[in-house]
Image (cartoon, rainbow, N blue to C red):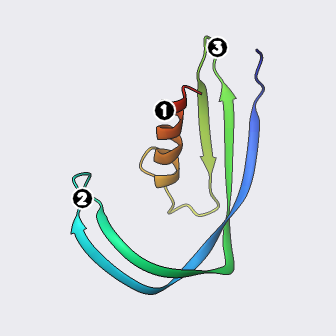
Amino acid sequence: MIFEKRTLRLRAFAKVNLCLHVMGRRPDGFHELRTIFQTISLADTLGLTVTPKRGGGVEIFMQSSDPELPVDGTNLVMRAIGAIVSETGF
């Protein structure tokens, strides 16, 4: 099977927390949350590029117009994608 470089652009809508209760800390360092939120029309556009590597696997690139936003492994979107890749073998 031959894969080509693919680019995906998605809108990530903002949300307003109507209620937010921060619970205890989880073993992974994040906090449990109880929240009620509503999406709003304000959104970022995420651009992701997946490029196949010779011998298998993929390289994933993220781009942002905000220079303050990390686009490496510290970004939660990239961490989530990495977890999906690890679980699916894609």
- Residue 53: where, in percent of width, then height? 63, 20
- Residue 1: where, in percent of width, then height? 76, 14
Q: Gap between marks 1 and 3, in whole Å?
A: 20 Å
Evaluate if marks 2 and 1 touch, with contact meaning CB atoms under 8 Å apart: no
Please name the residue that numbered disc 2 is placed on: 26
User: Which is nearer the eye, 34 or 62?
Assistant: 34
How many labels sit on residues?
Answer: 3
Q: Amino acid at mark 2?
A: Arg
Could you tell me which secondary element the residue under label 2 belongs to? Answer: loop
Which comes before the other along the chain, label 2 or label 1?
A: 2
User: Which is nearer the eye, 63 or 46?
Assistant: 46
Q: Residue at x 31, y 67 (%)?
A: 32
Q: Amino acid at mark 1?
A: Glu
Vertical order, 81 against 13 (above or below): above
> Is 48 positioned to the left or the right of 79 in the image?
right
Label disc, if present, on residue 87 of the rendered structure: 1
From the image, state whether disc 2 or disc 3 is nearer to you. 2
User: Which is nearer the eye, 72 or 20?
Assistant: 20
Q: Quadrant of residue 43?
A: bottom right
Q: Amino acid at mark 3?
A: Arg
- Residue 71: where, in percent of width, then height? 53, 50
Q: Gap between marks 2 and 1, in whole Å?
A: 22 Å
